[in-house]
Image (cartoon, rainbow, N blue to C red):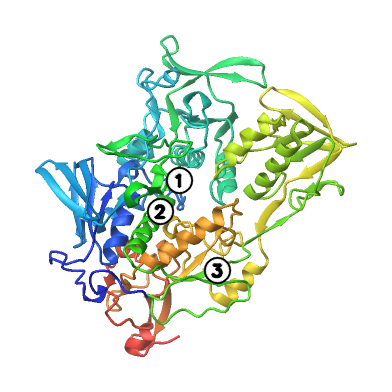
Amino acid sequence: MPPVLGFDLTAIDRQGYDLVMESAYRVVVAGGGPTGLSAAISLADSGVAVTLIEQSDGLGGHARELGCKATDRCQACGACLAAPLVREVRQHGLIDLITSGRIVNEELVGGRHRFTVAAPAGSVSVEADSLVLAGGYSTIDLSRYRQEYGHGFAPGVATTLELESEIRLRGPAGLTGRRFAFIQCVGSRDKALGRDYCSRVCCASSLRLAQLIRTERPDSEVTVFYQDLQPSGRDFGALVASCEALGVVLVRGLPSKVRWDPVVGSTVVCVADTLAGAARELPFDRVVLAVGQWGPGGAEVWPGRCLSVDETGFACPEQPNGAFAAGTMTGPMGLAEAIAEGKLAAACVLERLGHPLAELKDAGPDADFAPPDDPRQLGLLLNLPGLEESRPPGVPEEALGTAGLPAGLTGRTVFLMDLGGPFNRAAHLRAMEAAAALGSQAAYVYRHAYTAEMGLERLYNEMRRAGVGVHPYTETPELGDGRLRFRDPLVGLPVEIAYDHLVVGEQAGPSPANREFHDRLGLPLDANGHVFPSNPHLGPVGTPRRGLFALDNGRGVLGVRGFEARARALARAAATVDVRKGSAKVDPDKCVSCLTCLRVCPHDAPEILRCQQRKKHLAYIEPLECMSCGICIALCPAKAIAFVEPEEPQAAGPAAEEEAAS
């Protein structure tokens, strides 16, 4: 492991954070949301002193408002990720915390930053070697924009964040009302507001909330109004199917207005029913607005510092005067990705301060891997097959795929997407590029437009401007005699398109080679045959095996261009800053083999072994697989699990301590 900055990590007494620790460097982190917390912890664990400044009186940012959306099982919503970071920041001996603080001045003195911070106790001067900006995101001001949706006027209208906060406090059973409506894209994909991009996380968030309400409140009625469901993660298709099976009504079309109707005594959603060819007014008790993520837009964050932003109004990662911006202020993203971004910002700071970044060793399909003897040995990047693309069943033999299209394709061409298998964003990317090149000679027919990744919304709009006919469908189109027939749900009319060429988007599924990796490398498979479980605790590139990182394809999602380079950067950052903090350990005197740790561990670290000396089975937690999340410690009914430091000798199982066995 590369040397840390400031002092030797092995000398830290992590049980006594009241000790004064010296460090050769100091970094200011502006923002106490998940990204700022992650950056601060990563820097402090690497021996760098940190001053964390948060404008509000508490830590966690918007993540404080999120409620758990688990039903009979975890829904991988990530709502549980922020609280452990808050606790660790408050306890860390190298992190100075200033809440209700605001930077009012910044100047460069001798190559260092000097900040003046206004705090409740008075002004504070802080000198630092670098700066991480983690200001988070804002949402649409509904008192100024989209007032037609009735927020603040019509009873029962709330944002998704407000509903999350209510669920967090009262649980889904405590929600008032029986009829719920979700309206998507409030402040996103909106040209009139200058926010012509997808916020990526809103569809999955609304569907998880809808699923939770229908599961916990069987008497409820839930309707989701959307323009395009944007797949987020590899399990999105299963989430949509689960919602439909529970009776959630999915309506393609965004309402024009939400108002209070005193005659019927309820809030009314006005929406065009394209199938009926008429406007309808539907009564609901609760209307939930899925507000998107907004960037800072080049605002002056404090006197003397204006942000450098891109065309969408989000901050560029590298800022003037050696500062780094990270997290949702650089673009829409989910909680797990925002935490990974904090580690990336910390790694960039460490590199600037002279700390070498970890080197990653690529491991392809033929790589052999043995777990490292030292848990701190990190840096193997698995470039696994993960997924493979295939031709959907039932398409004509003459149909082409989006991969390997012949050059110079001419004539009327139909691109038919989403016929089978999980959502395939790589196929959408190739199809949109080819369709945009053909212009008015092309038609793009899809179930859900995939624009929730880097640059895809822009490409989607370029395709439309080029004259491509864009048509959604809900029922599988009919093919025959060189014609495509389907019903367009937006206009409510049948559509027939003649074509010279038919291009069908490939479906994506788990690679058969995944089983080989499971057997050879000891990597877990989920029920669908994917190499890694879908687990927000692992972030965008982590795996259940400490020291192993995986690119997008290995995680069960085909990435668009540019994603692999970003995934590599996140993996290298994680390998640099993820210093081993210890692991959970079972006390054999207290363990009653209740299997709770096996059921709740998201990392498959516990197992049950036979202890010959005690003549009973005991739980054992493999240190190399433990991710130190603390879930088993909190939920063990016998209080038999505790956290141990990495310096404490780790048994190789009950056998090492008391000649236990098999």
Residue at image x 13%, y 65%?
20
Q: Is residue 423 visible?
A: no
- Residue 91 lies, with reference to residue 325, above or below; the image says below
Q: Amino acid at mark 2?
A: Glu
Farthest left residue in view: 121
Per the image, label 1 sits on a secondary structure element best described as loop
Residue 648 lies, in percent from the top left, at 27, 80
Q: Amino acid at mark 1?
A: Met
Looking at the image, do the residues carrying marks 1 and 2 touch, with CB atoms under 8 Å apart? yes
Residue 593, by quadrant, is bottom left
> For mark 1, what is the residue?
333
Residue 218 lies, in percent from the top left, at 48, 37
Per the image, label 3 sits on a secondary structure element best described as strand
> For mark 2, what is the residue?
341
> For mark 3, what is the residue?
382
Looking at the image, residue 626 sits to the left or right of residue 121; the answer is: right
Q: How many numbered circles are shown? A: 3
Mark 1 closeness class: few <14, some 14–19, many ≥20 residues within 10 Å: many
Q: Amino acid at mark 3?
A: Leu
Looking at the image, residue 578 sits to the left or right of residue 639; the answer is: right
For the C terminus, the quadrant is bottom left
Residue at image x 70%, y 31%?
466
Mark 2 closeness class: few <14, some 14–19, many ≥20 residues within 10 Å: many
